[in-house]
Image (cartoon, coloured by chain):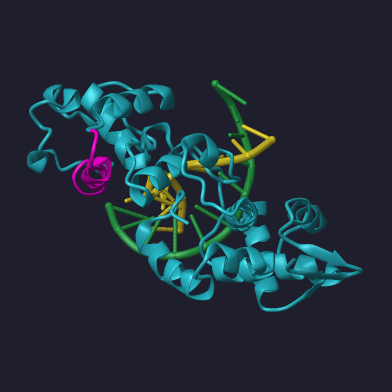
Chain colours: A cyan, B green, C yellow
Amino acid sequence: MLQQTQIARVIPKWIAFLERFPTVADCAAAELGDVLRLWQGLGYPRRARNLYEAAGEIDRLGTFPDTLEQLLALPGVGAYTARAVLTFAFEADAAVVDTNIARVYARVAGHRLTTTQAQAMADASLPLGDSWRWNQCLMDLGATLCRPVPHCADCPLRSTCAWQLAGCDPVLDPAVGSAGVSRPQSRFEGSERQARGRLLKALTAGTVRVDDVSKVMQHPAAMRLVEALCAEGLVRLEGKTLRLP
DNA sequence: AACCCGTGGAA
DNA sequence: TTTCCAAGGGT
C-alpha cells in the first residue's frame, strides 16, 4: 500500500484491510474483487492484484518468505519492499532506499545517484544489529527535514552534507524529481488512467454494461480500456456485463 | 533506458 | 488553477 502512496492515506485503508483479512490465508481465500473493493481510493489497483497473488503463493508455501531472494520473487515486491519486510518485520539487517532516503543520500553525496549507487551507499552505511531503527530514522529525516524543499538549518547532517556545504542552491539540488525514485508522470486529467480508475470505481459498486462504458468513463477510447483491464485481470467480462473478478 | 501504472493532498 | 509528488514495481 505504501508504494508511491503517502502513509497518512494508507493508514485507514490498512486498518480496514487487516480487519477483513487478519491473515495471509484469509486474503488468499477471498476473491480478487473483495481485495479491489478494499483497495478503492489507493490507486494503482495492480498492486492489489499483486498482493492477492502473493498471498496465494505464500499460503501455498506454508511459510512466510524471509530471505531477500524469496521476497523478490513475489509479485509486486521489488528492491524496496523486500528489504522493508526484512528490516521492519523480521528486524534483519537490510538497507531500504525509498524516495526519502534516496533524496538524503543524493544530497549528502552532492550529485545525482543511480538506484544502484544509492543502494550501495545505503548498504555501506547500515549499522548492523538494530538496522530497522536506522532505516526508520533516515526515512523520517527525509520526510521531515530533508524534504523536496529542505529545512537545512535544523538538519543533523548539515555539517557533512555536500549539497549543504555547496550552499544548498535549489538549482543545484541533486535530488530533483524524487531523486529519480519516482519518475515524472504524464497528464492525468482526461487520460486513460483516469478512465480506468472511473470504471474500476463503478465496478466496486456493482456491474456495468459494456454499452454504457463510454458514458461511465467519459472517455472516447472506451473499449480499449476495458480490454486493458481484462488483460490485467482487474475486470471480468461476462457476455456484455462487466464485473470484478 | 524509457515508459507505464491511480489517487489525492499540498504548494 | 496547475504542478508536484508520495515508505515503487514491472515491462
Q: Is residue A198 visible?
A: no
Q: Is residue B1 left or right of residue A216?
A: left
Q: Is residue A123 left or right of residue A165?
A: right
Q: Is residue A70 left or right of residue A218?
A: left
Q: Residue at x 45, y 39 (%)?
A: A182
Q: Residue at x 24, y 22 (%)?
A: A110
Q: Is residue A235 visible?
A: yes
A63 up-or-down from A216: above or below: above
Q: Tally the numbered discs.
A: 0
Residue most extreme to the bottom: A206
Magenta part mainly helix, strand or loop?
A: helix
Q: Is residue A82 left or right of residue A107?
A: right
* Residue C1: percent from left, percent from top: 45, 58
Residue most extreme to the right: A239
Residue A170 occupies quadrant? top left
Q: Residue at x 58, y 44 (%)?
A: A74
A198 up-or-down from A88: above or below: below
* Residue A201: percent from left, percent from top: 63, 69
Residue most extreme to the front: A62
Assign the C terminus of chain A to one quadrant of the image: bottom right
* Residue A96: percent from left, percent from top: 36, 38
A9 up-or-down from A178: above or below: below
Q: Residue at x 61, y 50 (%)?
A: A61
A131 up-or-down from A238: above or below: above
Q: Nearer the viewer, residue B7 or A105?
A: A105
In magenta stretch: residue A56: no
User: Which residues fall within the magenta stretch?
Assistant: A128-146
Q: Nearer the viewer, residue A227 or A173?
A: A227
* Residue A147: percent from left, percent from top: 25, 43
